[in-house]
Image (cartoon, rainbow, N blue to C red):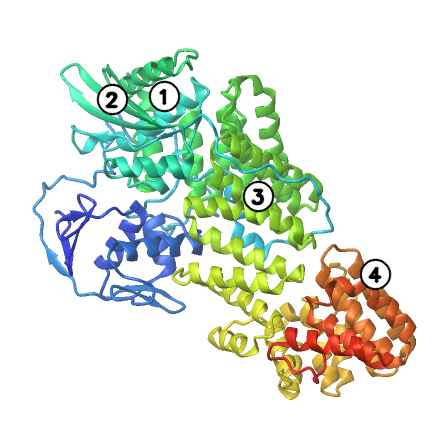
Amino acid sequence: MGRNVYRFGDYTLDPASRELRHRGEHVALPPKSFDCLVYLIENRERAIGRDELISAVWGRVDASDAVVSQTLLRARRAIGDTGTEQSAVRTVTRFGYQWVAPVESLPQEVEADARDPGVQEAAVDDGDDPATPAASEGVERPADASDARSDQPVSTKPRARRWRWGIAAIAIASIIVALLAVGLWRHSRKPPPSTGVADLAVVLPVVVESGGAEHAWIRLGAMDYIASLLRRNGRLTVLPSERTLVLVDAEHAIAPEAIDHLHAVTRARWVLQPVASTVPQGWKVRIRVSAPGDSYDIEARGGTPLEAAAAATGSLLHRLGHDGPAAPAPTALTQRLQQVDAELLAGQTDAARNLIDAAPARQRADPQLQVREGQLEFRLGRLGAAQILFDRIVDAATTLPVEVRSQALMGLGAVALRRQDNAASERRYDEAVQALEAHADAAPDPALVGNAYNGRGVARVELGRIDDGIADLGRARIAMQRSGDEVEAASVGGNIGTLKARNGDAAQAIQEFDLAIATFERFDVRDSLVVMLLAKSDAELQLLQPTAALGDSQRAMELGSKLENPQLRAFMAATRTGALLGNGRLQDAEGLLRQGQDASPALRLQLLLERGRLQDAHKLAQDLLLQDAAVNDPGTLLLAVQAAIDGKDPALARQWLQSRAGNGDGGNHDAIDLAGALLAAATGDQVTAARSFDAAAKAAARTPAPADDARAGSAWVAYLVGRGELDRASGVMGSLTPYVDRDYRVARASLALYRALGDRALQAEAETRVRRLAGERNPDSPVVY
């Protein structure tokens, strides 16, 4: 029985042919976005939870919020809907989505045995027994009682990017909002410039002009096969197939203007459009080669699609002067591997599973197929099954190709990392690195090398080996640049920048962020671009550049206004609020905080203190003392102590400081010391106050962030002025002079000092600075540190 065609407004959506049309014209839509529309329409009588949608479309439970929101954004754009209007796809707050537009369901007659073109029965044989389920051949699928649950989510129509080991291990957004606390680290080498690769090639999905649904795999399978031949035999740099599929409509031929756009975005020298068709003797593959100012066709024939593709690729390499060793003739196993790869590229995990299960015993036992099965099991969250497969490959007595062995080792590293066994993960990734380095003369795929270094770097950072981890991330970035994948290289660079920012090296962090921003802009990777702008805004606040921080946070808010990732939206709001507070725009900050139900405690406290709402700030400080997350944040502790002091409640301030007793996590000592200094000063313990102010200033000086110096130093100056120690206050103020025009707290400290000194000229200048920097802050209220 066929699936219906759905009509809504001027659009028709045909799940069987995988087409979306607007007034009869084809509308380009990424595969995953198409599947989201189908699932929401077919279940339009109810709201669909986010987890259910992920399970149905991605076939796993760990798709990131960024991926889901970007996929829905593209779907909405394709049908003229937006996250603001929500005339078709409505966001159900804190739950998921629901289709709300009127739909007319039109029946479509199809053959009883027809199936989705992306899910076909495998009919390939290696000369042994016919294709039958592997269990009957004595090669059983690995099972693990802890992972293979009967309710494991299974995709009905998933389409997602193929898993790439290690590169996703530190996602940019998650490292910014949830990366582990790390020790001090210094890394002063300037990062390499992000430039395009001179001889980069882009292989587009194959246009299949003839053949039935059983040949649908050729579209992506032959594309990836041609790319691998160019990379392996011609030593060319080829844009990874996953990246290509993000940039183009994989379902249809590419228009000439789109090819020009690909040249501009990727800076590729060659864009290759393969076309496959049947001929009496087998298959013909024609590759249209587009280069700046030139284009030509290469054509070849073969008994199978892959034979024809291999012959055409060989002719192309000869013409380009990149002749290498002849590629081995594609076998039945080669074809099955490419079929599996095609389904994984398209996210069709069910179809990939069917192809693996249907493989004859000899193919099923081949490590090349087993490593793909292990990757599939990992993708579906079956860690135990994945580990069994990867262990089987690594422990095999036979000599394996380095690519296969290293992928299995990285699979084990990824499993261990997911299980938080960081030592085991580092060991396995290190084995992969060593294996690849030992075969460097064979020129392994740079992307594979980059994945190995990235995974080892993540594990080493998790183990606290910061310098070693950062060095590995740097190696990973170079390898990804060499592979032609600038987006992954930028992602690694963004992670390095995040680590630098977390360790106070905001200036160098901004250099990394700027490089990543330029790449994400060019490739239109919207969610990553937003995250980098937010990270840059935070770093600019650390450098006492509040105006720049305000501009970057505003741009992030504009670009991310239609993104639906709740964590990213909360991150946007928090960063924007921090920038607004840093510029004294209290009303706008309060408006943003009112919109968010999970607003940062530190931001709420800061706003109340800046507003002079001391009773409310005191009450919030009392409530937050019961929350571990607030107590464990030194910045929140400092603000809570100030709220307690302003509320004439030194006992509460002591409770906050005592909550940190014995906590050796080591972050932000200057904030903790400063909180102790403020309490000691307020209670008349001048000895402790003097010692603690000095300790806070010294702790702040150990980090390169000017914001730490400004906070500790300005508070110390105010204390010394209040004590009448004007000579010493002048000495401290002298070191803060570079910040006096950029930081409100330093400007207030200078005003207090010049008033005490009776220097009217300098006092007048200081008053002007304070008014300029205050915004809506009251210059007569206590300074908030």
- Whichever of labels 4 and 2 marks the residue nearer the N terminus, that label is 2
Which of the numbered marks, if any, corresponds to residue 493? 3
- Whichever of labels 1 and 3 marks the residue nearer the N terminus, that label is 1
How far apart are the alpha carbons under marks 4 and 1? 68 Å
How far apart are the alpha carbons under marks 3 and 4? 31 Å
Three-letter code, disc 2? Arg
Judge left or right: residue 18 versus residue 669: left
- Residue at the image position 51 percent from the left and 18 percent from the top: 398
The spot of residue 756 in percent (x, y) is 85, 81
Judge left or right: residue 368 versus residue 440: left
Residue receiving disc 2: 286
Q: In terms of depth relative to the viewer, which is nearer, 241 or 656?
A: 241
How far apart are the alpha carbons under marks 2 and 1? 33 Å
Circles 4 and 1, Cβ within 8 Å, touching? The answer is: no
- Whichever of labels 2 and 3 marks the residue nearer the N terminus, that label is 2
Label 2 or label 1, whichever lies nearer to me, is 2
- Whichever of labels 4 and 1 marks the residue nearer the N terminus, that label is 1
The spot of residue 278 in percent (x, y) is 17, 22
Residue receiving disc 4: 698
Packing grade of label 2 (10 A; few <14, some 14-19, many >=20) is many
The spot of residue 588 in percent (x, y) is 51, 75
- Residue at the image position 57 percent from the left and 77 percent from the top: 586
- Whichever of labels 2 and 1 marks the residue nearer the N terminus, that label is 2
Three-letter code, disc 4? Lys
Judge left or right: residue 432 versus residue 223: right
Label 4 or label 1, whichever lies nearer to me, is 4
Residue receiving disc 1: 362
- Residue at the image position 40 percent from the left and 60 percent from the top: 563
- Residue at the image position 36 percent from the left and 37 percent from the top: 262
Label 1 element class: helix
